[in-house]
Image (tube, rainbow, N blue to C red):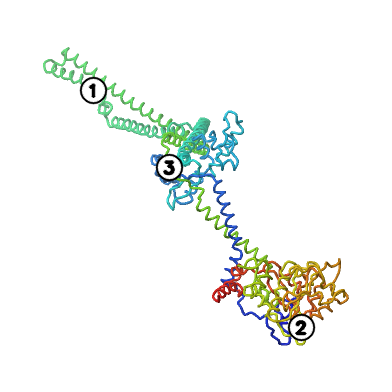
């Protein structure tokens, strides 16, 4: 037999014995172990049904989910943020030099802050109140009972619940859900690097989508004004309370200053103490008194000096300026003129002259008395001036002493005055700020301006049917590929000759096509080989026969055909190999050794009558049991059912029969039971010159084949081969495009057609 080495349990390829390279022996492949493009193509072709199924399911799921998704419409409005200094209240307000300036729009951080305000719960509540969404059954879930998913698919509408029948607590809870839904459907983003914000809202109703988007923009702008008004009101309330407190505090501090002044004698209308004012007055009065006293003393001294020089006092300044003296002198001049006139006309004794002289003497006496009185007045005036000066100097000294005593009290007074001034200044500052805020009331402007109103969209923004289906298709491809990869990794069957040699370490003898997948074949593979000798099936069996053929001198060669598991096509392979050997001129016998199934006997319609059991028991001769199938092919069937527990190897019966057959036939084929199912199979296989393991293509796991190979006798180490059965040649072209057998079908079919 031309069968090379048996699998020895290692992962390496089996080695041929003593340097022999038998036909059909495994060759060490120099093929690159990296994944090639053809292998990838083969993988996808093998598992394409999984991928297509996953794609179909994914597309169906995507279509269903798309159908279940509500149609959403998107509307957007644009809000422009203005710098703080551009607002009217800031342009009208007067701020002192060096005062902090109002915050400006100065970067993304400020824009992001305004975005947070737009999407805040407060603005959402204002929108709900403005549009009365909490009483709208389309938005408040407690006012509408939604249909099931199936109901939505068939177009069923929600059932409206009367507003009056809903408890207030449920309405409040529904309002919270409305606000939450508004915030979830709202988005606000900065447009590029500008100070503009795009406010977008998604809704099932295009009109409501535009209304709500505009409402958010408007309420945000209005909230700016309301916030400023609220801030102004809060500031005015605070200032009113603070001003009242500061007014009372300033009054108390001022009263404390005045009380302290009164208690310490520091009263003054000019801001100085009374003592200081007294000293100032005394200083002025003393200076005046000194001047007056000096003048009076000078006049008196002059008059006295004139009197000492012999003057009668007529030339004294005070006398000269006296009106009485002047009048008397005028009268004297008149009298003197009359005396002179009388003296010229009368004698010295004339009575008129004497009277005139007496009058003149009387006037002179009066003048002298008046002069004496003037001198006396000068003396009295000088004495008074001196006394007044002394009194003023005494009062000035006393005032200076009082001022020295009050200097300590002035220190505390200064502190009280500073506190009173600080209280008054703070009071005036708060009062000025209050008047400023009151004057600015009504001039507040919003920082935000709606520069683009939202309009109802022409079409829905979601679901995006094309995108959803594309995504579903991509997901299907990825999921199908992943499942196909997992299935491929879990697959443990054998597909190609390379897998047989590399995985099992056994030589590959050939493939038996799947008869049902071939065109124009008979009902069974055996009938196809028998009736169609030029068919692909017959040619494949001839190839297996040639691969397993080896000359055995002086005796017939015995080939055992078995499998790891049932239903792997070993019986059909046995019948076809036996028929092929007979047709090629070798006297052949095929023996049915499967006492349980008796498949070979049934295949030839010989399940009754004499057979192997009778020959082994000695109740029939070998010639009586043999059935001629072909001029050079005989069958040794199992014509009767074996007893329970009966074994063919008992008492060496099968051994004697095989020995007789080897002497009479050139080619003996033993159809054995599966190795893993029947224990005696390995013993019967030991009678053969070689063993073929029939492995069902892509069905029998590798581990089972390995286990079966381990059970074969060590003597057959170099004479075990594998045949893949029931191979779908059309699929093989997909699964292994580089496999020789994959292109065999088309090539041979073309060859046959050309030959005809």
Q: Residue furthest top?
A: 351
**Which mark, residue 455?**
3
Between 599 and 138, the one lying in front of the other is 599
Where in the figure is residue 129, as x and y percent of width and height?
Answer: 51, 35
Instruction: Please tell me which of labels 1 and 2 falls first in the chain.
Output: 1
Which quadrant is the N terminus positioned in?
bottom right
Give SS at disc 3.
Answer: loop
In the picture of the structure, the residue carrying the numbered disc 2 is: 556
Between 484 and 21, the one lying in front of the other is 21
Which quadrant is the C terminus positioned in?
bottom right
In the picture of the structure, the residue carrying the numbered disc 1 is: 326
Where in the figure is residue 239, as x and y percent of width and height?
Answer: 49, 35
Instruction: Please tell me which of labels 1 and 3 falls first in the chain.
Output: 1
Mark 2 Cα-neighbour bin, 10 Å: few <14, some 14–19, many ≥20: many
Q: Marks 1 and 3, how far apart in space?
A: 117 Å
Between 568 and 132, the one lying in front of the other is 568
Give SS at disc 2.
Answer: loop
Q: Quadrant of residue 538?
A: bottom right
Q: Marks 3 and 2, how far apart in space?
A: 97 Å
Mark 3 Cα-neighbour bin, 10 Å: few <14, some 14–19, many ≥20: some
Answer yes or no: do the residues labelled 1 and 2 have beta carbons within 8 Å? no
Q: Nearer the viewer, mark 1 or mark 2?
A: 2
Q: Quadrant of residue 515?
A: bottom right
**Is residue 157 toward the left or the right of residue 667 in the image?**
left
Give SS at disc 1.
Answer: helix
Instruction: Please tell me whether residue 101 is drawn above or below residue 523 in the rendered image.
Output: above
* Image mark count: 3
């Amino acid at each position: 037999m031309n069968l090379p080495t048996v699998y020895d349990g290692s992962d390496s390829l089996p080695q041929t014995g003593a340097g022999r390279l038998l036909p059909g022996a495994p060759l060490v492949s120099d093929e690159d172990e990296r994944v090639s493009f053809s292998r990838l193509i083969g993988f996808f072709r093998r598992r394409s049904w999984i991928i297509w199924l996953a794609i179909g399911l994914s597309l169906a799921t995507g279509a269903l989910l798309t159908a279940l998704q509500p149609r959403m419409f998107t509307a957007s409005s644009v809000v422009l943020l203005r710098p703080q200094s551009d607002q009217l209240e800031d342009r009208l307000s007067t701020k002192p030099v060096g005062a902090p300036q109002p915050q400006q729009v100065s970067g993304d951080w400020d824009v992001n802050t305004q975005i947070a305000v737009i999407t805040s719960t407060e603005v959402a509540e204002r929108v709900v109140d403005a549009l009365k969404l909490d009483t709208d059954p389309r938005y408040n879930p407690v006012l509408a009972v939604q249909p099931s998913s199936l109901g939505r698919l068939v177009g069923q509408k929600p059932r409206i619940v009367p507003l009056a029948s809903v408890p207030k607590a449920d309405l409040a809870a529904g309002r919270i859900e409305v606000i939450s839904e508004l915030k979830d459907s709202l988005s606000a983003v900065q447009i590029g690097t500008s100070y503009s914000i795009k406010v977008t809202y998604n809704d099932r109703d295009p009109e409501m989508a535009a209304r709500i988007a505009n409402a958010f923009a408007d309420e945000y702008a209005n909230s700016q004004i309301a916030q400023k008004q609220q801030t102004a009101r809060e500031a005015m309330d605070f200032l009113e309370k603070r001003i009242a407190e500061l007014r009372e505090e300033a009054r108390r501090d001022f009263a404390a200053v005045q009380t302290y002044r009164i208690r310490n004698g520091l009263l003054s209308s000019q801001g100085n103490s009374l003592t200081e004012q007294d000293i100032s007055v005394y200083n002025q009065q003393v200076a005046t008194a000194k001047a007056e006293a000096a003048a009076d003393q000078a006049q008196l001294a002059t008059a006295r000096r004139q009197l000492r020089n012999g003057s009668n006092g007529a030339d004294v300044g005070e006398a000269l300026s006296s009106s009485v003296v002047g009048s008397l002198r005028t009268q004297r001049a008149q009298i003197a003129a009359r005396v002179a006139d009388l003296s010229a006309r009368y004698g010295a004794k004339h009575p008129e002259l004497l009277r005139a002289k007496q009058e003149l003497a009387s006037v002179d006496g009066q003048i002298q008395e008046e002069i004496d009185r003037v001198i006396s007045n000068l003396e009295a005036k000088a004495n008074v001036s001196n006394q007044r000066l002394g009194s003023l100097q005494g009062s000035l000294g006393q005032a200076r002493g009082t001022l020295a005593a009050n200097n300590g009290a002035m220190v505390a007074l200064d502190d009280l005055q500073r506190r009173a001034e600080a209280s008054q200044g703070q009071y005036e500052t708060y009062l000025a700020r209050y008047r400023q805020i009151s004057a600015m009331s009504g001039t507040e402007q919003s920082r935000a301006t709606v520069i683009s109103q939202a309009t109802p969209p022409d079409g829905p923004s979601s679901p995006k049917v094309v995108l959803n289906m594309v995504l579903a298709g991509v997901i299907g491809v990825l999921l199908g590929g992943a499942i196909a990869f997992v299935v491929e990794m879990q697959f443990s069957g054998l597909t190609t000759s390379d897998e047989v040699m590399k995985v099992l370490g056994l030589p590959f003898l050939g493939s038996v096509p799947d008869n049902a997948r071939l065109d124009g074949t008979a009902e069974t593979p055996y009938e196809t080989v028998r009736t169609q000798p030029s068919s692909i099936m017959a040619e494949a069996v001839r190839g297996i026969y040639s691969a397993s053929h080896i000359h055995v001198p002086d005796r017939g060669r015995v080939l055992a055909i078995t499998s790891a598991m049932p239903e792997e096509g070993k019986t059909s392979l046995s019948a076809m190999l036996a028929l092929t050997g007979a047709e090629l001129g070798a006297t052949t016998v095929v023996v049915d050794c499967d006492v349980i199934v008796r498949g070979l006997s049934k295949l030839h319609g010989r399940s009754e009558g004499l057979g192997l059991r009778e020959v082994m028991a000695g109740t029939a001769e070998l010639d009586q049991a043999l059935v001629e199938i072909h001029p050079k092919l005989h069958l040794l069937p199992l014509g009767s059912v074996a007893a329970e527990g009966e074994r063919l190897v008992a008492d060496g019966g099968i051994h004697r029969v095989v020995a007789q057959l080897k002497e009479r036939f050139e080619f003996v084929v033993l159809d054995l039971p599966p190795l893993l199912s029947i224990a005696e199979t390995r013993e019967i296989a030991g009678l053969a010159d070689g063993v073929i393991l029939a492995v069902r293509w892509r069905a029998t796991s590798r581990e089972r084949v390995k286990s079966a190979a381990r059970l074969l006798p060590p003597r057959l180490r170099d004479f075990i081969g594998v045949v893949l059965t029931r191979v779908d040649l059309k699929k093989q072209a997909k699964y292994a495009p580089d496999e020789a057998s994959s292109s065999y079908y088309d090539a041979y079919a073309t060859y046959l057609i050309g030959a005809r």
